[in-house]
Image (cartoon, rainbow, N blue to C red):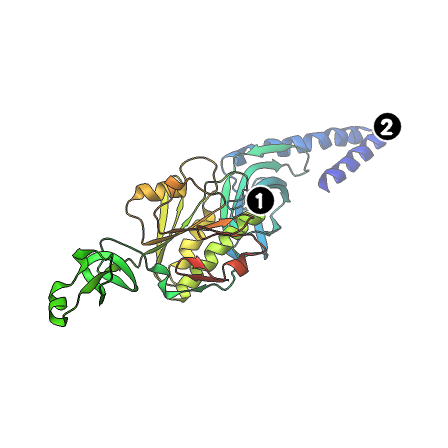
């Protein structure tokens, strides 16, 4: 509006000089073009001192409006207004959005994120304008704000035996499964042809007068890891959102059930959070949502295998099936966010079916 007013004044002064020329009119006509130039020259001291302040909530729910507030600190110099270019990236879906914001002292841009994830909001370019809004001057102002958009969750029921798995070096044993650990006895039963002679309990057989066999116990490990794959190529934003919603819903269910677990994913290195209760879940979930998706580097499965001994059971969430040699262990259950039928090895779900497919996790196997 200031530029339009200046243009109207300049046209009026020019017409006045043409219709009734005078010394005063000609001076006014010369001053009008010089005023924006003088104001623009006075902006140069701002190149090293001017800053842009950006404010936004740190955490917000999916689908809620997100106010981005931009402020220009007051200065003695005649700064009219500024043009600010803002770049917003969703780390989960990989979507980008850029917008230009015009502000004098304060401006508000209301975002709406349909998908969950970490929003990285960056001021990438700033142009300061003179008092008349005619001449721009680029300023080296940069600022960044990260917003975590938490997904909506759905109820998931987890079975208490979810964490039980085979382990060769453990002091606890499964009460309902046979194993190979002969140091502990699962049960004593009558001998049947074909049983291994080394399993015969000779001392007890001598007392009872007939052959008895000692069955070995199955050692178990109560550690559980939710492994999330962040290396992926082109993925539909709705499926990327659904994968995170499934992971966070499972984490919430495990926390509510009092089941400790590890939440791991791949970045430049393996990130891992130990979640023992409700207090640790928000930080772990926010860090996962803020992790950037990438098409390069090692997969989460590869990093997890190289990190050392795997957890007793691993729930592996991904969009694409990894090579079999990359799977962390035989106790890995794959949850694939992609269309197609499920199987014993792979549980498939889509944004439309995940609340039904994942409504109960029992011993690493989904129950409808």
Q: Assign a secondary structure to mark 1.
A: loop
Report crowding for label 1: few under 14, some 14 to 19, many 20 or more residues within 10 A (C-alpha). few
Alpha carbon separation for disc pair 1 and 2: 64 Å
Badge 1 is on which residue? 236
In the image, taking residue 296 as reference, residue 167 lies left or right, namely left
- Residue under the point 54% across and 41% down: 123
Measuring from the top left, give residue 36's x and y in whole percent.
67, 33
In this view, the residue farthest toward the bottom is 208
Q: Is residue 9 above or below residue 18?
A: below
Q: Which mark is residue 309?
A: none
In this view, the residue farthest toward the right is 19
Q: Quadrant of the N terminus?
A: top right
Q: Nearer the viewer, residue 238 or 342?
A: 342
Looking at the rendering, which quadrant does residue 83 occupy? top right
Measuring from the top left, give residue 34's x and y in whole percent.
69, 30
Can the viewer see residue 269?
A: no
Badge 2 is on which residue? 18
Measuring from the top left, give residue 56's x and y in whole percent.
53, 52
**Among the two numbered marks 1 and 2 on one chain, the one whose residue lies closer to the N terminus:** 2
Q: Nearer the viewer, residue 274 or 311?
A: 311
In the image, taking residue 306 as reference, residue 243 lies left or right, namely right
Q: Nearer the viewer, residue 59 or 33?
A: 59
**Total numbered circles:** 2
């Amino acid at each position: 509006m200031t530029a339009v007013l200046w243009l109207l004044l300049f046209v009026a002064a020019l017409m006045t000089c043409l219709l009734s020329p005078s010394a005063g009119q000609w001076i006014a006509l010369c001053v009008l073009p010089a005023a924006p130039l003088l104001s623009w020259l006075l902006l140069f001291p701002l190149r090293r001192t001017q800053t842009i302040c950006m404010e936004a909530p740190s955490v917000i729910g999916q689908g809620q409006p997100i106010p981005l507030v931009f402020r220009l600190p007051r200065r003695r110099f005649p700064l009219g207004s500024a043009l600010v270019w803002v770049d917003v990236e969703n780390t989960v879906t990989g979507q980008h959005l850029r917008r230009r914001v015009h502000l004098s002292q304060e401006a508000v841009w209301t975002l709406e994120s349909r998908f969950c994830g970490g929003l990285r909001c960056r001021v990438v370019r700033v142009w300061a304008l003179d008092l008349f809004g005619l001449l721009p001057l680029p300023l080296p102002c940069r600022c960044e704000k990260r917003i975590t958009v938490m997904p909506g969750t759905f109820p998931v029921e987890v079975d208490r035996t979810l964490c039980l798995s085979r382990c060769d070096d453990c002091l606890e044993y499964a009460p309902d499964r046979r194993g190979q650990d002969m140091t502990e006895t699962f049960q004593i039963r009558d001998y049947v042809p074909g049983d291994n002679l080394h399993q015969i309990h000779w001392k007890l057989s001598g007392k009872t007068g007939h052959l008895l066999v000692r069955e070995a116990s199955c050692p178990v490990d109560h550690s559980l890891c939710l492994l999330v794959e962040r290396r992926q190529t082109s993925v539909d934003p709705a499926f990327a959102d659904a994968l995170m919603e499934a992971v966070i819903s499972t984490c919430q269910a495990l926390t509510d059930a009092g089941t400790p677990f590890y939440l791991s994913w791949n970045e430049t290195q393996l990130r891992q959070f130990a979640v023992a209760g409700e207090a640790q879940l928000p930080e772990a979930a926010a860090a996962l949502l803020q992790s950037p998706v990438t098409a390069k580097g090692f997969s989460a499965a590869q990093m997890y295998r190289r990190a050392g001994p795997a957890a007793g059971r691993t729930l592996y969430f991904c969009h694409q099936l990894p090579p079999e040699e990359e799977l962390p262990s035989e106790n890995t259950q794959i949850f694939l966010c992609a269309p197609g039928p499920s199987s014993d090895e792979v549980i498939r779900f889509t944004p439309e079916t995940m609340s039904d497919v994942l409504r109960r996790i029992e011993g690493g196997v989904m129950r409808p």
